[in-house]
Image (tube, rainbow, N blue to C red):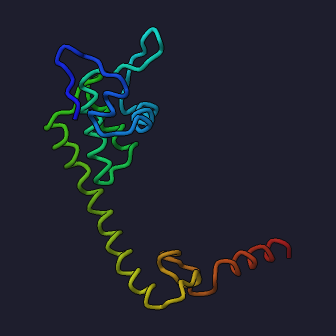
Amino acid sequence: MPQIPEKIHELTVGQLSARSGAAVSALHFYESKGLISSRRTSGNQRRYTRDTLRRVAFVRAAQRVGIPLATIRDALAELPEERTPTHEDWARLSEAWRSELDERIKQLNRLRDHLTDCIGCGCLSLDSCVLSNPDDAFGERMAGSRLMVERGRGRRG
């Protein structure tokens, strides 16, 4: 990993990419979503402060555990302007995200259990597939396409 001399207080997008492991396009995307910020030089080149490295690490760690970018952006917005997230910030935010992650894990476990049923039936039927059509209240009566036709006829007549 390239080292950046202490006297350099700003990074180019290439330096930030090399140090953070994030692609340049990802960094541009993060910036467009308000997750990181830069200033522009007189030549219109981006320059990032050194603490952007920690913000990028924070974003990538949160993404790896499944936190949506909008949620990450909201969390970073709670920090004082441009402040680097600290260990304490991560601990506080990760605790807040725990219940959301627990719920997602429950959903994934249900999907995994239904996947076994789906593979067992062998048909991948949209009429009765609990993966394609979870909690289908009308599925007991008839398939969705027939239900739409039924509704269409009801309007005409």
**Where 108 sits versus 90, above or below?**
below
Q: Position of residue 154 (x, y in %)?
A: 79, 76
Q: Quadrant of the C terminus?
A: bottom right
Q: Quadrant of the N terminus?
A: top left
Determine the residue located farthest toward the right in the rendered image. 157
Determine the residue located farthest toward the top in the rendered image. 42
Q: Quadrant of residue 111?
A: bottom left
Q: Position of residue 30 (x, y in %)?
A: 40, 35
Q: Nearer the viewer, residue 105 or 140?
A: 105
Query: Which residue is rendered at x = 31% and y = 73% of the image?
Result: 109
Q: Quadrant of residue 38?
A: top left
Residue 84 is left or right of residue 139, and the answer is left
Q: Quadrant of residue 116?
A: bottom left
Query: Which residue is rendered at x = 41% and y = 80% of the image?
Result: 115
Residue 17 is left or right of residue 137, and the answer is left
Q: How many callouts does the rendering have?
A: 0
Q: Position of residue 106 (x, y in %)?
A: 30, 69
**Where 127 sits versus 12, above or below?**
below
Q: Position of residue 31 (x, y in %)?
A: 42, 31
